[in-house]
Image (tube, rainbow, N blue to C red):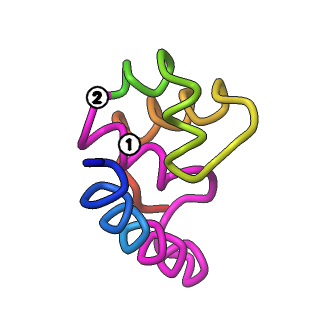
Amino acid sequence: YILGTYIGPLQGTTTSSLFQLQAAGEARPGHIDLVWFFGVAWGIGGLASSHRLANDAGRSGDIRDATMLAIDVLLDGLRT
């Protein structure tokens, strides 16, 4: 219920904004929407431990790529 009512819509707005930043060259490429979601809601450990939730948050594929990106973002930030 919480994911569908509150988290999902907010994540949709955040994802859209992050994609706009990426398109403008202002944010690094990759799955930064997942990095943002897990960094804010669960912490980066959640990204590696919950593949189903990661897919539900909007991205599918190899979760290891997103996890490595999360580490880069944590160390260097979202900006390119």
Return the residue at label 2: 43
Q: Which mark is residue 76?
A: 1
Say which element carries label 2: loop
- Amino acid under disc 2: Gly
Work out whether 8 lies above or below 43.
below
Work out whether 48 lies above or below 68.
above
How packed mark 1 is, by other alpha carbons closer than 10 Å (few <14, some 14-19, many 20 or more), is few
The residue at the point 56 percent across, 76 percent down is 25
Q: Which mark is residue 28?
A: none
- Amino acid under disc 1: Asp
Q: Earlier in the sequence, mark 1 or mark 2?
A: 2
The residue at the point 38 percent across, 42 percent down is 76
Name the chief secondary structure element in magenta. helix
Q: What span is in magenta? A: 15-43
Q: Position of residue 36 (x, y in %)?
A: 37, 49
Q: Position of residue 80 (x, y in %)?
A: 49, 62
Which of the pair 73/8 is nearer the observer? 8
Question: Does the magenta portion include 38?
Answer: yes
Question: Does the magenta portion include 42?
Answer: yes
